């Protein structure tokens, strides 16, 4: 450690802020050298004010991003779990409205929660909701613009994904789980969802200022996901048809594309 | 005597409130007579959506000040260039009447701790903080205000008093200061300083804004009162008394009511702002000849009302 930096304080304090403390001895060990009370005496209790501020404010930040996970786990469990996550994945930016990207993966890999496999996808829905809420203000692709494309050019069309739009495919009823657990009122009003696994998908989008979450059929989800990944319209239709047993409703898919708010522009030099 | 208002940037020497998303609709409907609204810069660093829409609507009606909590000016890390660039975009977009930050650190080796953490006051830390303030002012192209902290600990190697430290920073960098009167009370109780001496030593000629907020009470290692800067309740009676004393001595200044936790309904905040405004207006009307800026501030209040 360089002496000139040591004097500045942050390198000494930082190490003691997030370490778990189970006893007075632990706290004494976490206390940085030279951190004192008014009479120059070591002041672990005073230092713990900062430790508490740091941890409780970060738990609050994570909880505001993941209200449904917080609701599902209950306050005490969420706080303990969040502390564990925060110690392993502390924020790397002062912009906390972007904090917690790794939380879904953390939930997936947390052995005590292995019996609750829907938690991770519920967290992914909450993360997509947050990204949509703060996404750039970009108008959606207008149906008129799509209608103006010449018939022989439609097949090669590619589309630019809207910055607020995300498609989440999950075997779990994450839309219902999320709706029911975001608030206390919803928990009391809505019935518990049927947790049997299935082929499900949701679209998260923000046509104006309000984020919307809607169910997609598995076919729509595969189609829109292929387009979001940059496939051409004909390529995306091929992807869907490869999955379908019978006839796909191509007109219905094109209608869902036009109204999805999942795209903002055609990928070519046109005016729209 | 020196009047403060000419140093107060574009903020009126009136009472302002922190802007909370839950209150925006009501504010836009009621148009309450509030001198200005202050926002935490980091809450507006998303690309778009509701937060920017709300702030734009407020900015049409009221002066806005930008208060940063994440620059870590008191830290060892170099300033985060990406964060400075984000701040610059906000300054360009909203043309805030003022920008302020804290004498504290919050990031170390890239980890952001989301708290205003303390630093020892030495010649070395002074030089580092001054470099950081210079950089902020250069990148943002404005004169920033630096806020005195609430502190819970001291450092054995500290050689300068907090007021000396702040006066040196203002003198060397040309920055202004933000006097948080609640922080003065909290730190003075916690550090066993006299608030009267602290305020007498504070370089008031650099002050461009005042903050008032509520605090909680805990106890320290020896069972003595330890005050916590919690911003979760009304301003304490002792803080009101210190504030009234500051204003009586130095004239009116832009004054923010800070309430960030356990947020009450808007009328409770408006009551706190009115209480500050009563103290400020008494000293706008008596004693000092109103400057052009003060007249403009009064017009701002009437328009907002």
Image (cartoon, coloured by chain):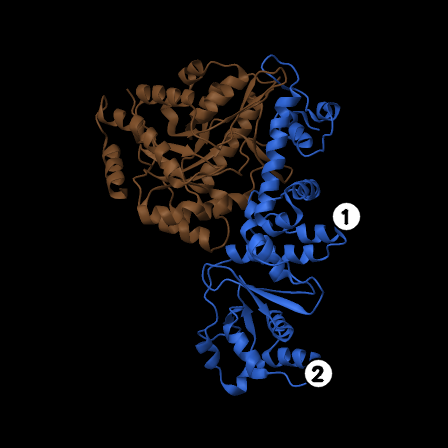
Chain colours: A blue, B brown
In the image: residue B163, left or right of residue B57 = right
In the image: residue A272, left or right of residue B277 = right
B49 vs B103, nearest the viewer: B49
The CA span between labels 2 and 1 is 39 Å
Estimate how packed mark 1 is, as few (under 14), some (14 to 19) or many (20 or more) residues with alpha carbons within 10 Å.
few
Q: Which residue sits furthest bottom?
A: A152
A203 vs B107, nearest the viewer: A203
Task: Write the residue at 65% across / 73% down.
Answer: A218
Task: Write the residue at 38% across / 26% down.
Answer: B206
* Residue A44 quadrant: top right
Question: Above or below — where is B201 with respect to A212?
Answer: above
Which numbered disc, 2 or 1, marks the residue that appears first in the sequence? 1
Tag 2 and tag 1, C-beta contact below 8 Å: no
User: Mark 2 — residue?
Assistant: A245
* Residue B150 visible at all: no
Q: Which residue sits furthest top?
A: A39
Question: Above or below — where is A263 with respect to A71?
Answer: below
Image quarter where the C terminus of chain B lies is top left
A177 vs B160, nearest the viewer: A177
Q: Chain of mark 1?
A: A
* Residue A169 visible at all: yes
In the image: residue A49, left or right of residue B16 = right
């Amino acid at each position: 450690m360089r002496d000139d930096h040591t004097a500045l304080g942050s390198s000494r304090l930082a190490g003691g802020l997030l370490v778990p403390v189970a006893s007075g001895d632990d706290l004494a060990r976490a206390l940085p050298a030279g951190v004192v009370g008014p009479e120059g005496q070591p002041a672990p209790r005073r230092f713990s004010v900062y430790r508490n501020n740091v941890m409780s404010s970060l738990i609050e930040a994570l909880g505001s991003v993941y209200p449904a996970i917080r609701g599902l786990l209950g306050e005490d469990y969420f706080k303990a779990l969040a502390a564990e996550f925060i110690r392993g994945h502390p924020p790397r930016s002062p912009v906390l409205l972007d904090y917690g990207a790794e939380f879904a993966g953390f939930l997936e890999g947390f052995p005590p929660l292995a019996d609750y496999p829907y938690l991770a996808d519920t967290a992914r829905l909450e993360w997509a909701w947050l990204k949509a809420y703060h996404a750039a203000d970009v108008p959606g692709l207008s149906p008129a613009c799509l209608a103006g494309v010449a018939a022989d050019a439609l097949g090669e069309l590619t589309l630019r994904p809207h910055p607020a739009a995300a498609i989440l495919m999950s075997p779990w009823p994450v839309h219902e789980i999320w709706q029911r657990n975001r608030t206390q009122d919803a928990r009391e009003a809505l019935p518990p969802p049927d947790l049997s696994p299935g082929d499900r998908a949701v679209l998260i989008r923000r046509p104006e200022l309000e984020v919307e979450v809607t169910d997609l059929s598995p076919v729509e989800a595969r189609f829109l996901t292929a387009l979001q990944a940059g496939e051409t319209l004909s390529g995306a239709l091929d992807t869907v048809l490869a999955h379908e047993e019978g006839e796909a409703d191509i007109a219905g898919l094109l209608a869902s594309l036009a109204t999805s708010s999942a795209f903002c522009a055609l990928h070519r030099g046109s005016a729209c | 005597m020196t009047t403060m208002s000419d140093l107060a940037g574009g903020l009126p020497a009136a009472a302002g409130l922190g802007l909370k998303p839950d209150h925006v609709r009501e504010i836009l409907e009621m148009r309450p007579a509030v001198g200005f609204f202050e926002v935490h810069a980091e809450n507006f660093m998303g690309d778009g959506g509701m937060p920017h829409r709300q702030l734009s609507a407020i900015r049409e009606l009221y002066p806005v000040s930008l208060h940063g909590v994440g620059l870590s000016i008191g830290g060892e890390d170099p300033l985060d260039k990406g964060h400075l660039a984000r701040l610059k975009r906000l300054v360009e977009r909203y043309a805030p009447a003022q920008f302020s930050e804290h004498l504290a650190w919050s990031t170390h080796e890239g980890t952001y701790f989301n708290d205003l953490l303390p630093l020892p006051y030495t010649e070395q830390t002074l030089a580092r903080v001054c470099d950081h303030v210079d950089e902020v002012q250069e990148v943002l192209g404005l004169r920033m205000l630096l806020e005195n902290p609430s502190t819970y600990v001291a450092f054995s190697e500290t050689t300068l008093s907090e007021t000396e430290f702040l006066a040196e920073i203002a003198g060397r960098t040309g920055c202004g200061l933000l006097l948080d009167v609640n922080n003065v009370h909290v730190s003075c109780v916690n550090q066993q300083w006299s608030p009267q001496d602290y305020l007498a030593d504070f370089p008031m000629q650099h002050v461009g804004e005042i903050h008032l907020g509520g605090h909680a009470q805990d106890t320290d290692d020896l069972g003595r009162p330890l005050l916590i800067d919690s911003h979760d309740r009304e301003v304490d009676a002792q803080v009101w008394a210190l504030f009234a004393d500051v204003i009586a001595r130095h004239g009116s200044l832009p004054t923010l009511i800070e309430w960030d936790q356990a947020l009450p309904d808007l009328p409770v905040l408006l009551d706190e702002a009115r209480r500050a405004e009563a103290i400020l207006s008494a000293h706008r009307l008596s004693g000092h000849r109103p400057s052009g800026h003060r007249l403009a501030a009064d017009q701002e209040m009437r328009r907002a009302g």
